[in-house]
Image: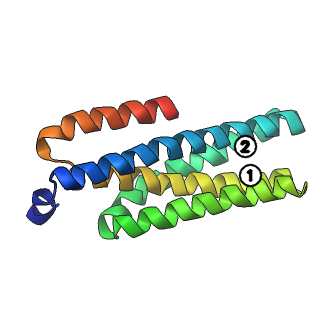
Amino acid sequence: MSEVEVKGADNKSFGMYMLFFSGQIFSLLGSSIVQFVIIYWITITTGSALYLGLSATLGFGSTIAVSLFAGVFVDRWNRKYLLGIVDGLEAAATFILVYLFYIDTANIIHVLVLLTVRGAMQGFHEPAVQAIIPVMVPKDRLSKVNSLTYLVSGVTF
């Protein structure tokens, strides 16, 4: 992190971060609800413990697998564009799922593939959000914002 980025963390950028953070609360909550509902649908539809385990592994496992190296890319790429891309891809995967359910053609393979895509995008999302905090939040508020961020993340997952 350069000295220019730290100096840029003033009250205006803090206000922008709080607006961003408010949106993230709803986004994370929505993503968690979608993940839960899809896994519930798999349980009800297939009745198979194998598919249930596979869906959880692909959904959460892809997040973990991508998170192992995502931080390196987050540090090298433009975080604003990265967040836009991964949020857009995650939203697109969700809309495709909604559409497949709407036209009543969703099957277990579609759902598993789209769960994997959503999980992988979430693996990039979290490190990018964490990297934005020190840039936008003044040093004197950093510990409070980090605490609040981890609290919200814990509640929504």
Q: Earlier in the sequence, mark 1 or mark 2?
A: 2
Residue 116 sits in which quadrant? bottom right
Residue 65 seen: yes
The amino acid type found where label 1 is placed reads: Leu
Secondary structure category for the residue under label 1: helix
Task: Judge by depth and name the residue closer to the eye, 114 or 24.
Answer: 24
Task: Judge by depth and name the residue closer to the eye, 9 or 111.
Answer: 9
Residue at far right of view:
104
Q: Position of residue 79 (x, y in %)?
A: 35, 64
Residue 133 seen: no
Question: Is residue 69 toward the left or the right of residue 12 in the image?
Answer: right
The amino acid type found where label 2 is placed reads: Leu
Q: Please tell me whether residue 56 is drawn above or below residue 130 in the rendered image.
A: above
Frontmost of labels 1 and 2 is 1
Q: Position of residue 101 (x, y in %)?
A: 83, 52
Q: Please tell me whether residue 90 is drawn above or below residue 22 in the rendered image.
A: below
Residue highlighted by disc 2: 54
Colour approach in the figure: rainbow
Task: Judge by depth and name the residue closer to the eye, 45 or 80.
Answer: 80
- Quadrant in which the N terminus is drawn: bottom left
Residue at (54, 39) in percent of width and height: 29
Question: Is residue 19 toward the left or the right of residue 106 in the image?
Answer: left
Asked whether disc 1 touches disc 2, contact meaning CB atoms under 8 Å apart, the reply is yes
Question: In the drawing, what numbered circle is on residue 112?
Answer: 1
Secondary structure category for the residue under label 2: helix
Residue 34 sits in which quadrant? top right
Q: Position of residue 144 (x, y in %)?
A: 23, 33
- Tell me how many marks there are: 2
Q: Is the residue marked by circle 1 packed among few (<14), some (14-19), or many (20+) residues within 10 Å?
A: many
Residue at (13, 57) in percent of width and height: 6
